Amino acid sequence: MGRRSAIYPYQRTGDRWTKPNYLYVIIDAEKSKVLYVGISMDPRNRMRQHMRKPWFPDRVSMDFHGPMTREDALIWEGVLIAKLHPPYNNHPGYWLCEDGRFTIYGSKPEYAAS
């Protein structure tokens, strides 16, 4: 597995860090394929936003997990993206570093080092 490193600092202030967060997984019900993994403080509203996207299927299954802290939600989101490779997520997954920042580790073939 290749590694492509990029650091994204996240400020730990505001509602997203103090209110409950939810992890959600969007699955194409006909193909049983994970399409997208995300996090939100308001997963129902976020689903309505996704439903307007051209890739959103007619028959869909959605799994919600939570409530949890934003930090835990970000960790789980990154792990699932790195392992499941959902086609509509724009990053390969990330992992929490001890310094409070996130490092991206490429696990999709297009992110692997040559």
Image (tube, grey):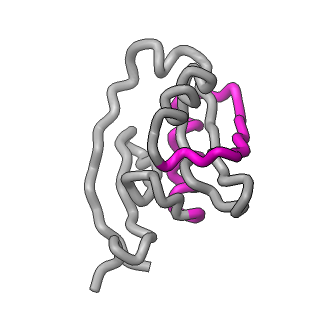
Q: Is residue 96 magenta?
A: no
Q: Is residue 61 left or right of residue 71?
A: right
Q: Nearer the viewer, residue 101 or 24?
A: 24
Q: Nearer the viewer, residue 30 or 102?
A: 30
Give the image location of residue 53, x and y in percent: 45, 40
Q: Is residue 69 magenta?
A: yes
Q: Nearer the viewer, residue 81 or 62?
A: 62
Highlighted magenta segment, given as a residue range: 55-84
Give the image location of residue 58, x and y in percent: 64, 45
Up-down relation of residue 71 to residue 87 (above or below)? above
Q: Is residue 75 left or right of residue 92?
A: right
Up-down relation of residue 68 to residue 30 (above or below)? above
| Quadrant of the image containing the N terminus | bottom left
Residue lying at 58% horizontally and 37% vertically, measured from the top left: 72
Q: Is residue 100 left or right of residue 82?
A: left
Up-down relation of residue 51 to residue 86 (above or below)? above
Give the image location of residue 67, x and y in percent: 69, 25
| Quadrant of the image containing the C terminus | bottom left
